[in-house]
Image (cartoon, rainbow, N blue to C red):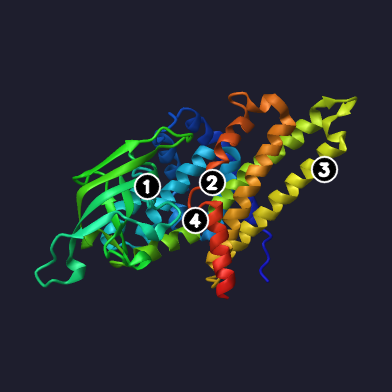
Amino acid sequence: MTSFSLTPAQLARCTELRILAAERLRPLAEKGEPGRVNRPLVTELGRLGLLRGLFTSGALDLCLTRESLAYACTEAETALALQGLGAHPVHAYGTDAQRARWLPGVSEGEAVAAFALSEPGAGSDAAALALRADRDGTGPDTDTLRGRWRLTGEKCWISNAPEADFYTVFARTTPGAGARGVTAFLVPADRPGLTGTAVDMLSPHPIGTLAFDGVPVTADDVLGEPDRGFRVAMTTLNLFRPSVGAFAVGMAQAALDATVGHTSRRDAFGGKLKDLRTVAHQVAEMAVRTEAARLLVYAAATAHDEGAPDVPKRAAMAKLLATETAQYVVDAAVQLHGARALRRGHLLEHLYREVRAPRIYEGASEVQRGIIAKELYAS
């Protein structure tokens, strides 16, 4: 059985990241325009070396980074995560030329990446993708790997769209083949026929739709192999789902700490709020659930780093429990703070807005339960 206690070096790193987030990143985040890529913030993440760590660290280190940043600056955490999600397929499956072209810019915070999987009719059911990659001739030797395609269709709910510099795009190259007929492409934002529209949503970063009107791509743009793109998507999600849980744990811990402080100071009914048994028990429940979620996240990340066979199940469990827990903890914190928690600018008002989306993206909670059940019955 693996132990999930952190080393002194890891604990020190988490403390350092919290301080950096509060002192260096939060001021930049506060200057950002909602619904737009905060490029100064992304650049600072690169300057601090945090983006480079996306490609040199394991899953546990990624979780510790995301949890620590989320505690003090959710915008910085999300900016880092979106860089990783969009660029990891290039790092893991790209050619030497693709990596050389894009990864230095991502690491330095100069190039903004995006992960374009969801579609109007294929959100949680990623195998139902309809964006077409129609054959547009092949090389002179008719070798498939020298092929050319044109992308036609739409992507929606894409974080960093339409402002990203490049997109990891998943398109159907073989009709009727389900998950086996999807190919991953690296598509620069300036490719002819590609346009994007911002969607006005409850989100600090841009979310938009992408329209593909015969966008040309070639074998040089393929990530991995043709018709094997579903594996690219799932491998990426198996890495990032536990770290979504870490993001949630960071928010839950921030809400819990704020609640401990508030209930210790707040006068109520002749004593402090914490002296009320119902309040103290509520805070204890918040703490237990937060710690349980944290340990499950660490377990899933460690399993990923060790190459365990049950990573999909563990990743789904971690994301499910942590995001649902964070929703509970933040909501309970708001209740115990009262009306002041919903005043614009209050930490909990901010967390209350931020905590909802992780239960949906990268596979909704219902999808995670489906993955867990499938893995259980397959064993």
Q: Secondary structure at mark 2?
A: helix
Q: Amino acid at mark 3?
A: His
Q: Residues within 10 Å of mark 3 (few under 14, many from 20)?
A: few
Query: Residue 153, position in %: x, y?
Result: 27, 49
Query: Residue 72, position in %: x, y?
Result: 59, 38
Give the residue number, with chain letter if any, for mark 4.
Answer: 240
Depth check: give the residue in front, 78 or 179. Answer: 179
Which mark is first along the chain, 1 or 4? 1
Which mark is first along the chain, 3 or 4? 4
Q: Amino acid at mark 2?
A: Pro
Q: Amino acid at mark 4?
A: Phe
Q: Residues within 10 Å of mark 4 (few under 14, many from 20)?
A: many
Q: Secondary structure at mark 1?
A: loop
Query: Residue 360, position in %: x, y?
Result: 51, 47
User: Residue 164 lies in what quarter of the image?
Assistant: top left
Is residue 304 visible to the viewer in this orientation of the structure? no
Q: Which tag is nearer the camera, tag 3 or tag 1? A: 1
User: Residue 110 lies in what quarter of the image?
Assistant: top left
Q: Residue at x 43, y 43 (%)?
A: 47
Q: Residues within 10 Å of mark 2 (few under 14, many from 20)?
A: many
